[in-house]
Amino acid sequence: KAGVTQTPRYLIKTRGQQVTLSCSPISGHRSVSWYQQTPGQGLQFLFEYFSETQRNKGNFPGRFSGRQFSNSRSEMNVSTLELGDSALYLCASSLGGGRSSYEQYFGPGTRLTVT
Amino acid sequence: DQQVKQNSPSLSVQEGRISILNCDYTNSMFDYFLWYKKYPAEGPTFLISISSIKDKNEDGRFTVFLNKSAKHLSLHIVPSQPGDSAVYFCAASAGGAGSYQLTFGKGTKLSVIP
């Protein structure tokens, strides 16, 4: 079974631009979560989608948004990029129902650099 | 306010010996705990988990212990192998409260010396 895939793997953007990251979950997984990893803050939860609906949201500004499609694939968008948005963005998928939601499987991440 | 803490940023262990990684948490709503292993330039890999209704879970060389009264969990790796060298993250979830988001510690870098 293929794992979680994320595209692109690396991205360089300029301050003020916007960016869209993509995530394809493990086949059969219906929940997709996004995390930001930075050296200072560690891994922080952005949001979770289940059946095309945002189920949970972390403490990030409204510039960070996401969506999920009917095939469970998810995209994450960051508008008006700031230097502090430079990070590794990780997507994780899980089966999504009850206790099966706990165990999340991560993709390799997208390394975003904002200059 | 860090709800999940890994107080040791790094740990060095000789090959063949036991590695013990520790994690403390403050949120009593957490009811499920997980350990992930991460190599550079890769996403975290799920290792082992434990529900709050248990105090021990074992999977091969990996055992996780949970002490609810102390809000403490630990991961034991026996015997340690050089391939175990990685950053280990402890994570917790409060799914019983309706949220499956994972709250992570900042990680412990384990180095297993041949």
Image: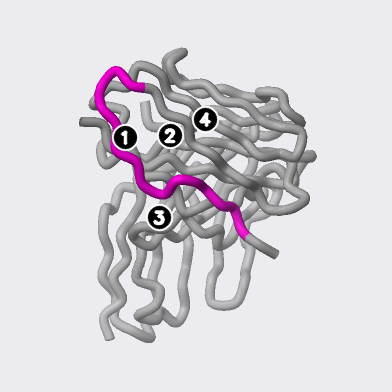
Answer left or right for A107 relative to A97: left
Task: Answer yes or no: are tags 3 and 2 on the same subunit.
Answer: no
Name the residue at 46% across, 21% down: A64
Instruction: Kindly indicate whether the residue at mark 2 contacts the one at mark 3 (C-beta within 8 angstroms).
Output: no
Report if the CB atoms under discs 4 and 1 are less than 8 Å apart: no
Q: Secondary structure at mark 1?
A: loop
Q: Nearer the viewer, mark 3 or mark 2?
A: 2
Q: On the image, numbered disc 3 is attached to which residue? A: B22
Residue A48 % position (x, y): 61, 31
Q: Which residues are magenta?
A: A3-17
**Residues at marks 1 and 3 on the same chain:** no
- Nearer to us of marks 4 and 2 is 4
* Secondary-structure class at tag 2: strand
Q: In the image, residue A83 lies at what x, y percent?
A: 23, 26
Residue marked by disc 1: A41
Q: What amino acid is labelled 4 in the image? A: Met
* Amino acid type of the residue tagged 3 in the rendering: Asn
